[in-house]
Image: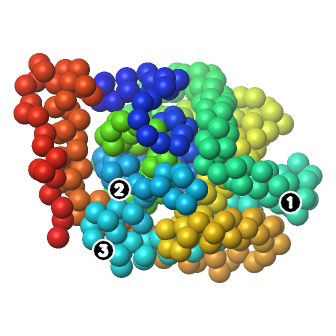
């Protein structure tokens, strides 16, 4: 882990050698833009309201497994990437399921379900932006049109422009939210030890009702914590490799470290900040569970005032959702490209832009009911591939850590050099 942290947090502005289209950091921020969304602000309080403070510990534990999952996805994405008709590197589950697992059926199932799932997801994300803007007097349709124009200007520039935008937007929005969260936690610093006790005790013991909190059983705590851990960083969905596969890198494992970096940033930093803001401020016992999505806003308002506190959360929500929409439009394009060709992929860009407008005027009740089903059709085939090719991931990992060119401590460890033929292709 120290080496991984040094190669990611310590190499953010370093240039990387090897083949690729965008820098490793741009690839990571592009993937982060998708996973850092509104749910990191509203989803964590809901998990605490429904499962108690102990859900946070289960969220942390799940993220540890998620680091391994996302590492494997990114490694396989780089291992089986290829160049498209525009000369850009492309990869992801659609490619490693077909070329590595030798299962065209799972590749098509995963890509088709993901492509279909993204369109209604964009509409729901658009609705979130518009509802947030509506609270400050901006009509939903006007917001939808502006967002559509902004997204179009970015996504029509391809992964290169997306990478340039996200490498500036993601750190900016993450720093704003984290910095303001630290101020709220600092004001309530005396409550931090008690909050940590609640997290660790609540994870293994039932909690009785307190104030607005209705109490929770251990199974309920696990369920909400694990769900939030999975949804927060998208580990297992196979979405991140589509961005990472364009990265300039000299070895799949080196880019895999950025997958670990993603999970640390999303769950370890952003979600943890939200959890501590909610727990140290005490709003988790004051706000009713049905209004849990507003807990972060209430906590910020208790320190910054009603106008400024609410404004900070609204701005963060807008930036988080906007960044998510930009990247998932790119993901949708890549699914169509993998299924058909790059021309169809460009057509899907337009379909996704139309979905933004639909989110401001359409009825989304039916869309919500099918999103989880479609998501399951993405996760299952992807995880079959990740588990089925685990020996290959391990072999590539051994290759990296046994070569002094990649890992300076390899000589001291005296690990036998890896031979390419030792990679075991799954049947």
Alpha carbons under labels 1 and 2: distance apart: 38 Å
**Left or right, 318 with reference to 368:** right
| Residue 57 x %, y % | 37, 43
The residue lying at 52 percent from left, 35 percent from top is 23
The quarter of the picture where the C terminus appears is: bottom left
Q: Marks 3 and 2, how far apart in space?
A: 14 Å
Residue situated in front as seen by the camera: 266 or 238: 238
Judging by the rendered image, the residue that carries numbered circle 3 is 103
| Residue position marked by numbered label 1 in the rendering | 145
Residue at disc 1, secondary structure: helix
**Residue at image coords 18%, 65%:** 426
Q: What element carries label 3?
A: loop
Q: How crowded is mark 2: few (under 14 residues within 10 Å), some or many (20 or more)?
A: many
Residue 217 shown left or right of residue 373 in the figure = left
Instruction: Please report the residue visible at 39 percent of the width from the left and 72 percent of the height from the top.
Output: 107
Return the residue at label 2. Answer: 80
Taking the image as drawn, is residue 276 in sight? no
Secondary element at image label 2: loop
* Residue 352 x/y as whole percent: 69, 67
**Whether residue 18 is situated above or below residue 407 in the rendered picture:** below
**1 or 2: mark nearer the eye:** 2
């Amino acid at each position: 882990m120290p080496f991984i942290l040094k190669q990611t947090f310590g190499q953010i502005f370093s240039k990387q050698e090897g083949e690729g289209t965008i820098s490793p950091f741009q690839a990571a921020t592009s993937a982060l833009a998708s996973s850092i969304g509104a749910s990191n602000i509203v989803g964590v309080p809901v998990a605490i309201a429904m499962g108690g403070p102990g859900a946070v510990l289960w969220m942390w534990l799940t993220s540890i497994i998620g680091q391994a999952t996302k590492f494997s996805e990114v490694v396989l994405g780089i291992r089986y990437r290829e160049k498209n008709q525009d000369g850009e590197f492309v990869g992801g589950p659609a490619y490693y399921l077909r070329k590595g697992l030798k299962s065209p059926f799972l590749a098509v199932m995963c890509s088709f379900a993901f492509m279909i799932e993204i369109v209604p997801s964009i509409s729901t994300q658009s609705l979130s932006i518009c509802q947030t803007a509506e609270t400050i007097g901006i009509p939903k349709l006007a917001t939808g049109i502006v967002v559509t124009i902004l997204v179009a200007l970015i996504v029509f520039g391809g992964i290169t422009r997306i990478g340039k935008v996200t490498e500036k937007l993601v750190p900016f929005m993450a720093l704003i939210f984290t910095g303001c969260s630290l101020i709220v936690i600092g004001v309530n610093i005396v409550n931090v030890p008690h909050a940590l006790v609640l997290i660790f005790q609540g994870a293994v013991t039932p909690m009785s009702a307190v104030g607005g909190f209705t109490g929770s059983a251990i199974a309920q705590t696990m369920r909400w914590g694990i769900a939030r851990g999975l949804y927060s960083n998208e580990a297992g969905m196979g979405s991140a490799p589509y961005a990472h596969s364009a990265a300039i890198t000299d070895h799949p494992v080196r880019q895999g470290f950025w997958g670990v970096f993603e999970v640390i940033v999303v769950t370890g930093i952003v979600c943890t900040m939200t959890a501590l803001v909610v727990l140290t401020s005490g709003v988790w016992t004051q706000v009713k569970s049905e209004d849990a999505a507003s807990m972060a806003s209430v906590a910020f308002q208790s320190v910054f005032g009603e106008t400024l506190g609410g404004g900070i959360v609204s701005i963060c929500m807008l930036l988080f959702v906007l960044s998510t929409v930009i990247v998932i439009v790119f993901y949708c394009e890549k699914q169509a490209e993998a299924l058909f060709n790059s021309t169809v992929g460009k057509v899907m860009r337009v379909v996704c832009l139309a979905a933004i407008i639909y989110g401001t005027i359409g009825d989304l009740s039916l869309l919500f009911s099918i999103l989880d089903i479609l998501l399951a059709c993405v996760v299952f085939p992807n995880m079959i591939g990740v588990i089925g090719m685990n020996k290959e991931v391990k072999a590539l990992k051994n290759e990296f850590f046994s070569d002094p060119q990649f890992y300076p401590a390899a000589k001291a460890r005296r690990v036998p050099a890896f031979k390419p033929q030792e990679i075991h292709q799954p049947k």
